[in-house]
Image (tube, coloured by chain):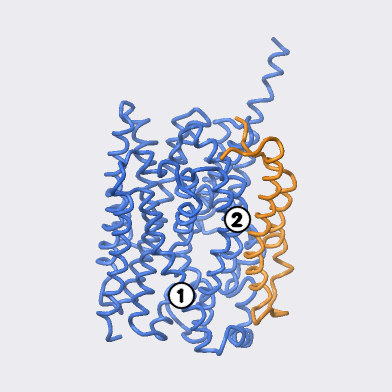
Amino acid sequence: MNAGPITVATILLIVVGGAAIGVLAGSHRRMDLEQWTVGGRQFGVLLVWLLMAGEFYTTFTFLGASGWAYSRGAPVYYVLAYQPLSCVVGYFLAPRIWELGRAYRAQTLADFFTARFSSERLGALVALVGIVFLIPYLELQLTGLGVIVEVASAHTVGRVPAMLTAFVLVAVFVYTSGIRGVAWVSVLKDALLLAVVIAVGVVIPQRYFGGIGPMFRTLARVAPRSLVLPGNTVQLGHAWFATTVLLTAFGAPVWPHLFAANLSAKSADTLRRNAIVMPLYGLTIPLVIFVGFAATVVLPGLRDGDLSMLALVAKTFPAWVLGIVGGAGALTAMVPSAVLILSAATLFMKNVVRPLLAPALDDRGVARGARWTVFVVTAIALGLAIRGSSTLVALLLIGYAGVAQFLPGVLLGAFWSRTTMRGVACGLVVGLAIVAGLMLSGRDPYRGLNAGFLGLCANFACVFLVSAAAWVPAPARARAG
Amino acid sequence: MRSTARISRAALLLAVVPFIGLDLTVAWWDRIRPTVAGLPFNLAWVIGWTALTPLCLWGAHRLDRRRVADPGGEGP
């Protein structure tokens, strides 16, 4: 690639343009905590949709989906399957979360736990666990951004300068505009991503195979195993697929940043309507998967499957297209990162620092602290991303398995009035212990089942049993006394 | 706390449909043939459900709205 400067200039233009939109989005508003974290609870269908799409479609959509298609084959279909199902879960759960959230004046996931179970300590536990899982997810976005820019610029821009530049910009627009900035940067991100994915996903199969049908005929001839489960893997079979899809579908709505996005809606029905249209956005993911499959034939033997899409785009298109792909990819990392940073910072100040260390702090103090914490969180994630990295999807799956353990507290807390604080705390600890135990010892999937799913089952059982035990003896005592 | 719109059984039943289609039946639809518009059967199946799920949710929404609309209507 000797057209490096064009590509780099295009990427830089897109990244800086995106950040400028983010800063402008909030510059005319007074940023109190309510405005900064949940946009004053005034977002209509369009902004909620932009925000949720912005959070949902991350660098994983870009690199991971093509990478999984490339290296694993059919197991990548779990991404297609879980997204519509998580919208189904959201359709029922989100309006209830919104309702309770408004009644509790909750701005974070931990606020919800604190208010619902009258326990600041449970809220602090949730906040800490949430932060622990948000940081690797953030690091994943950062690493993805570094890879995208490095490869798209034909190695004229290194990972580290790319990550530093992009994330200083992210921290600045999160600091100034909060959640509103994230939603508006999504406009540019979604438009570019859509254009790129459609162009690349249609052109590449056409160019190398003469169409999508012929491409799959070729694959069915040269690599038939990759087209059905477990694909090129041994363990990712039907049971893994079913349990992973369930875990991710139910786990998605309780990610702290997605949970908080619900609170920004102006009505419960906004969230229902958003959940109805949201799955359609996922129709673009098959195009990304096509590119990954195409690369298995056109560019076999890549060392890192996550790079298959960029490598194939670089081989197929002129420099400026690569620049747009790189810029869109960078924004696709920046938008979710912005909201991850925002969530982590708010959880830390509002639900950890204030209740445990500084009870005298007022809301303005929390807001000021949270906004400065943005830079600390960004610096930590940058440090982690620069020092080390691991495969994109493995990190995401550990995060998903861990975060999904919030579900019983949210779901039963929202719909079952007898859920107790003790039950939720027990369930959370047991669920996390199972996930950590199985995953850190390399036993995921366990007997073909997703480890997070197993943790979730135990978690639900704990919450239910402990809550029920607290409730049953009451009438018995009453009779005795 | 009472909810503004309680979930009806019919809406829940509609919501279960995509779970059956995408999750519980994976062993049945995970195959290459017959191909659909050039796509392997399993991929076409999953894409089809991505498009069908909004229909199911839209149906659930209509059912819920009718229920809510009956006793006086939902607030703005």
Name the residue rendered at 39%, 58% in the picture: A335
Q: Do the CB atoms of the residues marked 2 and 1 lie less than 8 Å apart? A: no
* Residue A319 at x, y percent in the picture: 33, 82
Label 1 belongs to which residue? A305
For mark 2, give the secondary structure: helix
* Residue A69 at x, y percent in the picture: 53, 74
Label 2 belongs to which residue? A276
Residue A471 image-quadrant placement: top right
Label the orange chain with its letter.
Answer: B
Q: Is residue A117 visible?
A: yes
Residue A9 appears left or right of A220: left
- Give the Cα distance between marks 2 and 1: 33 Å
Residue B53 image-quadrant placement: bottom right
* Residue A377 at x, y percent in the picture: 31, 49
Lower sequence index among marks 2 and 1? 2
* Quadrant into which the C terminus of chain A falls: top right
Name the residue rendered at 26%, 73% in the picture: A157
Above/below status of A474 relative to A106: above
Image mark 1: chain: A
- Mark 2 belongs to which amino acid? Ile
Above/below status of A209 relative to A143: below
Above/below status of A182 relative to A114: below
**Front one among A224 and A9:** A9
Residue A254 appears left or right of A349: right
Chain A painted colour: blue
For mark 1, give the secondary structure: helix
Image mark 2: chain: A
* Residue A49 at x, y percent in the picture: 49, 55
- Mark 1 belongs to which amino acid? Gly
Q: Is residue A440 visible?
A: no
**Front one among A335 and A133:** A335
